[in-house]
Amino acid sequence: MTTRLERRFADLRSQRRAGLVTFLVAGDPQMASFEELLAGLPAAGADVIEIGMPFSDPMADGPTIQAGYLRAIRAGTKLRDILPAVRRFRERDSTTPVVLMGYYNPIWNYGRLQFLDDAVAAGVDGLIVVDLPPEEDEELCLPARERGLHFIRLATPTTNDRRLPTVLANTSGFLYYVSVTGITGARTPVAQQVAEATARIRRHTELPIAVGFGIREPEQAAEIARFADAVVVGSALVELVARHLDDDGHPTPAMVPAVLDKVRALASAVAGARP
């Protein structure tokens, strides 16, 4: 039985185009506005949705996403609030893959096996846990895969050919290639370097490759979409959320339209990138 992620990437291949993966922080700036955004993403052109699980020490993320996590935490968002939001999304959308991205500490506090069972029940399709290396696969990766959850791993420009098979061993769904070294949103990827990196990775795996970190504008997304199976955009969307808050930190009426308009522009650029 194929999964939502597998079907989505198969559809993208048949359409001969790359996909758009959007990232937003759950509960940023509050759960109601986040769920409004979540509901609008598929129609705006998001092929896969990544949801950031708020954490107080997000070491792999840049200041924009760190600020989004802090806004969500101040609003009272907890991991136990995110799964019901996914469940409500699933009542309206049964086809768009949803991936939770974050750090292991909140999952451990929740209870790792209970979290996995609840995630499956809510309609989550995969996990990206940035601080669990392959050497710790028995902790979460293998139990997740036993339950039908994809475990998506990161590869970086410093992941050499010797390390890559270890990274790929239990990875499923897709491989997330971090196109620049450092934290999210800090630098802009160079298309030629991404082309060379994805070509090298494809010699090791048939998994789809999604490329992210530093992609902010439609023109950049279109460049990367020439080589990648999907383009990930996160910091640019979280920044738009931050720019449309009032003095009390509440969303203005313009916030949801601004974010969804950006997603439409990105989706259009990605879809038209290949001849």
Image (spheres, helix red, strand yellow):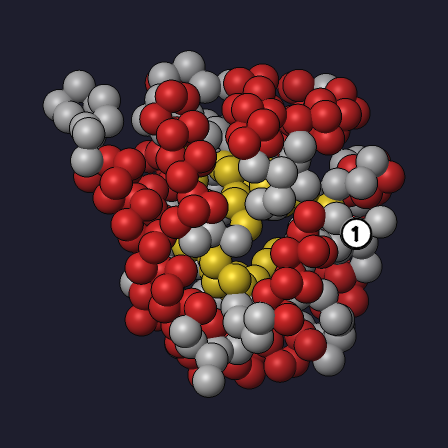
The picture quadrant where one finds residue 71 is top left
Q: Is residue 186 visible?
A: no
In front here: 217 or 167?
217
| Residue 199 shows in this picture | yes
Residue in the picture at 49% in, 66% down: 179
x%, y% of residue 42?
47, 46
Residue depicted at 67% across the width and 43% down the height: 126
Rendered residue at 58%/45% (across/down) = 96
The one nearer the camera, 59 or 214, is: 214
Image mark count: 1
Image location (x, y in percent) of residue 273: 42, 76
Q: Which image quadrant for residue 32?
A: top left
Amino acid found under the numbered disc labelled 1: Thr
Circle 1 SS class: loop
Q: Position of residue 231 (x, y in %)?
A: 48, 62
Residue 151, placed above or below residue 165: above
- Side of 160 where 33 appears, left or right: left
* Figure quadrant of residue 39: top left
Against 190, residue 73 (above or below) is above
Q: Is residue 2 left or right of residue 5?
A: right
Q: Residue at x 31, y 59 (%)?
A: 265
- Residue 118 lies, in percent from the top left, at 71, 23
Q: Check disc 1 and report the residue beneath it.
A: 2
User: Farthest residue in the left direction?
Assistant: 247
Mark 1 neighbour class, 10 Å CA radius: few under 14, some 14 to 19, many 20 or more: few
220 relative position to 135: left or right: left
